[in-house]
Amino acid sequence: MRTLVFGDIHGGKKAVEDLLAKVKPTKTDQLIFLGDYVDGWSEAAETIDFLMELDRQFSCVFIRGNHDELCLDWLKTNKAPEMWKLHGGLATMASYKGMKTHKKEQHILFFEGLRNYYLDTQNRLFLHAGFTNVKGVQYEHFQKMFYWDRTLWELALAIDKNMEVNHARYPKRLLHYKEIFIGHTPVTRIGKTKPVQAANVWNIDTGAAFKGPLSCMDVDSKVVWQSDAVFQFYPKEKGRN
């Protein structure tokens, strides 16, 4: 059994298909998706359909991303904030155009069923963004931090690599879990295109919404698979540039 973690997709269904063809998951594997399934490329609704079907074939865990929550709000209220539309929402809205009500209701149920985080039996934490409570995720007062926070990644990047975990100033947030796997903040912002480790935090978002590939990592072996750069599948689109 492999535990496979996937980075942010942002409506790039073709990249998911390309990546899965390389990963070749089996029925014994567990597939963990870190959120942000929509907002970016033109196949947001199609991506959700694909993931729902994938869930019927494999053991999947779907984490909630901030863009998924924004899309859910729009599907339920028909209200589309300008900021959301500017950051991928327009492409998502277009992909849902003409969808029948019963199908849309199925997508709403999918979004409502997403997890804020997943903690496996080996004390490895999977979530979209981060958390702020120094005692750990179960004590988090601000639930939206699970899919909006960026301070966890910033904190991990800022740690001196020579600092021992028993140092008095070592961040308490990071001591509760063997490893933490996140997305949300593309590693392309620090000039990388493959998953990056900082302290015990692994960032799997390799910029699929922009010019990067979609990535998958085997959390045990740390083997990484990547799709082709996602923008190449959508040559007439701008993504989230």
Image (tube, helix red, strand yellow):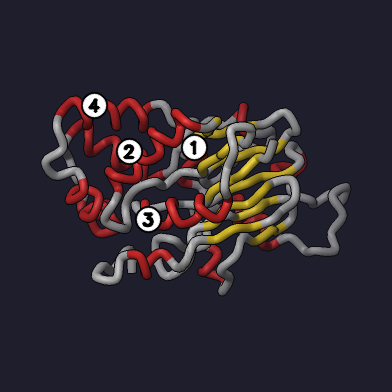
- Which amino acid type corresponds to the residue marked 1 in the rendered image? Ile
Q: Nearer the viewer, residue 156 or 90?
A: 90
Which marked residue is nearer to the observer: mark 3 or mark 1? 3
Residue 198 location (% of width, % of height): 70, 58
Q: Secondary structure at mark 4?
A: helix
Q: Is residue 237 above or below residue 78?
A: below
Q: Is residue 142 visible?
A: no
Which marked residue is nearer to the observer: mark 1 or mark 4? 4
Q: Residues within 10 Å of mark 4 (few under 14, many from 20)?
A: few
Residue 183 location (% of width, % of height): 53, 51
Estimate the spatial distance between the alpha carbons at disc 1 and disc 2, rounded to whole Å.
16 Å
Residue 233 location (% of width, % of height): 35, 65
Q: Is residue 72 visible?
A: yes
Residue 105 — which label?
A: 4
Answer left or right for 210 relative to 101.
right
Along the polypeptide, which appears first: circle 4 or circle 3? 3
Along the polypeptide, which appears first: circle 1 or circle 2? 2
Q: Residues within 10 Å of mark 3 (few under 14, many from 20)?
A: some
Residue 93 — which label?
A: none
Along the polypeptide, which appears first: circle 3 or circle 1? 3
- Which amino acid type corresponds to the residue marked 3 in the rendered image? Lys
- Which amino acid type corresponds to the residue marked 4 in the rendered image? Glu
Q: Which residue is mark 1?
A: 63
| Residue ID at (46%, 52%) | 8
Q: Which residue is mark 2?
A: 49
Q: Nearer the viewer, residue 159 or 42?
A: 42
Q: Which residue is mark 3?
A: 14
- Which amino acid type corresponds to the residue marked 2 in the rendered image? Asp
| Residue ID at (64%, 57%) | 224
Estimate the spatial distance between the alpha carbons at disc 3 and disc 1, rounded to whole Å.
20 Å
Q: Residue furthest bottom?
A: 191
